């Protein structure tokens, strides 16, 4: 009987040392938040530096620049596996040490890619992917036990800003550095902050990794541990399904918005780029706002259901964009789409931590893998629909149906968790 209040607290707040209860006295989430935000930003910037420098990289390697875009697919593909393996790595070495390994993988990727050798460039995507999947589980493991109830969604939403921030920094800083110093130097410059963060994390490492189990064994089948949650926990399964869909829809907007607007005569290239920027900025600005709303009023799950419904409406509207639309109306669609299809991730990770309870690290790892899979699968299907003659209205309508399916999965009544 004594264990039931703690379990209830874990389902309600998900922020104690064991996934429930209040944060320990003197705990402070801000230092881990800053560290993991920087971790995510630098790793993402490294990943998106290759597409940002694609024309020069392609010229230097003697390949079509479009092939460089495959780099991201490799990062996310390997990242799915590393996300599932990360809980066992965190258990053995600690979350802080695993974060340092992420930065080591980032440094390895940057150096290998800067070598100018095509095989090493390909290998560098695998190297970065081996670390990239651990970024969210590391953050959850460090932040959740140090966060007061009623603050978790906000803190994790702030941390998730690292993804668009890293992409933005790559887009803004890498091209000018490529033109000024060459693409290889533009990559190597990023080694400095990555190594600096690795060193900085060493200072609190003993304290942050006090819960590690050095005797824990590392096995490839450790990747199956998070996957078991799909069978044993319906709430985690439904949330994984929804975030798989939401992440894929987000990338459909990002990958096809500019070409849709330009090819359909809705806007020229400059204005289309502005529309995409509005989508991205809306996702960044809205994340902490959703975190506050989820913490104070609605809860993350109910808000994610609403996100799916609004995301579906935005997708339908995007499919109807035509030269008859005014540009402010186009931007309004981008704002709504960005705030939902891009703004949901922080509260999604907050919900994974909450319903995961003591297994929050495994639940977060599963969530990362599901999102990575959505990023890889749905944009390809979206493109196939367009290429097969369905056009953008049908493709976006399909995305809307998927968004509703995700929302319905989250809205399904929860069954009481079986006692183990």
Image: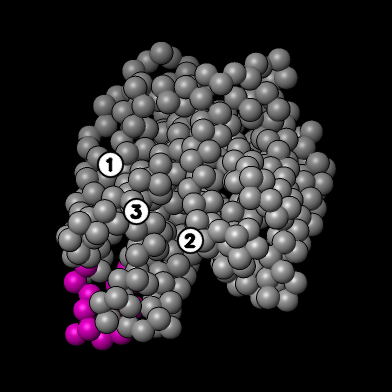
CA separation in Å, label 3 and label 2: 16 Å
User: Which residue was labeled with disc 1?
Assistant: 410
Query: 81 or 136: which is nearer to us?
Result: 81
Mark 3 Cα shell of 10 Å, populated few (<14), some (14-19), many (≥20):
many
Q: Position of residue 267 (x, y in %)?
A: 32, 83
Quadrant housing residue 180: bottom right
- Marked residue nearer the N-terminal end (1 or 3): 3
Which is more toward the observer, 146 or 229?
A: 229
Label 2 Cα neighbours within 10 Å, binned few <14 / some 14-19 / many ≥20: few
- Measuring from the top left, give residue 138's x and y in whole percent: 61, 39
Which residue is drawn at the image coordinates 41% and 13% (left, top)? Answer: 420
For numbered disc 2, what is the local secondary structure?
A: helix
For image coordinates 42% across by 29% down, the residue present is 8
Q: Which residue is mark 3?
A: 379
Q: Which residue is mark 2?
A: 66
Residue 321's disc number: none
As helix, strand or loop, the secondary structure at mark 3 comes to helix
Q: Position of residue 164 (x, y in %)?
A: 52, 61
CB of mark 1 within 8 Å of CB of mark 3?
no
CA distance for labels 1 and 2 = 37 Å
Q: Nearer the viewer, residue 212 or 191?
A: 191
Left or right of 35 in this view: 166: left
Outermost residue toward the front in this view: 62
Residue 167 position, x and y percent, is 55, 62
Which region of the structure is painted magenta?
319-336
Please name which of the two marks, 1 or 2, marks the residue nearer to the observer: 2
Q: Is residue 91 visible?
A: yes
């Amino acid at each position: 009987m004594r264990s039931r209040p703690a379990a209830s607290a874990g389902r309600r707040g998900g922020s104690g040392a064991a996934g429930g209860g209040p944060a320990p006295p003197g705990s402070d989430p801000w230092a881990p938040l800053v560290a993991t935000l920087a971790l995510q930003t630098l790793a993402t910037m490294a990943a998106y530096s290759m597409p940002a420098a694609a024309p020069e990289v392609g010229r230097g390697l003697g390949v079509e620049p479009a092939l460089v875009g495959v780099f991201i697919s490799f990062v996310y593909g390997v990242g799915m596996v590393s996300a599932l393996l990360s809980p066992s790595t965190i258990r053995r070495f600690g979350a802080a040490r695993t974060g340092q390994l992420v930065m080591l993988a980032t440094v390895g990727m940057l150096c290998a890619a800067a070598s100018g050798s095509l095989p090493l460039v390909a290998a560098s995507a695998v190297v970065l992917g081996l670390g990239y999947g651990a970024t969210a589980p590391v953050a959850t493991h460090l932040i959740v036990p140090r966060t007061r109830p009623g603050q978790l969604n906000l803190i994790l939403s702030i941390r998730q800003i690292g993804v668009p921030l890293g992409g933005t920094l790559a887009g803004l800083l890498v091209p000018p550095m490529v033109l000024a110093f060459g693409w290889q130097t533009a990559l190597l410059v990023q080694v400095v902050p990555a190594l600096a963060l690795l060193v900085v994390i060493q200072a609190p490492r003993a304290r942050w990794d006090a819960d590690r189990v050095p005797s824990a064994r590392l096995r490839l089948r450790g990747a199956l541990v998070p996957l078991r949650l799909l069978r044993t926990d319906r709430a985690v399964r439904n949330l994984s399904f929804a975030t798989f869909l939401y992440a894929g829809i987000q990338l459909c907007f990002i990958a096809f918005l500019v070409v849709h607007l330009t090819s359909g005569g809705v806007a020229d290239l400059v204005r289309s780029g502005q529309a995409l920027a509005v989508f991205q900025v809306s996702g960044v600005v809205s994340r902490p706002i959703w975190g506050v709303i989820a913490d104070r009023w609605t809860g993350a799950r109910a808000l994610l259901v609403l996100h799916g419904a609004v995301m579906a409406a935005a997708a339908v509207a995007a499919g109807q964009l035509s030269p008859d639309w005014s540009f402010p109306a186009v931007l309004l669609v981008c704002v709504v789409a960005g705030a939902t299809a891009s703004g949901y991730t922080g509260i999604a990770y907050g919900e994974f931590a909450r319903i995961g309870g003591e297994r929050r690290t495994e639940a977060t790892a599963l969530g990362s893998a599901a999102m990575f899979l959505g990023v890889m699968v749905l944009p390809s299907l979206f493109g196939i629909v367009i290429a097969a003659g369905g056009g953008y209205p049908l493709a976006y309508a399909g995305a809307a149906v998927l968004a509703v399916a995700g929302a319905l999965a989250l809205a399904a009544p929860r069954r009481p968790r079986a006692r183990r």
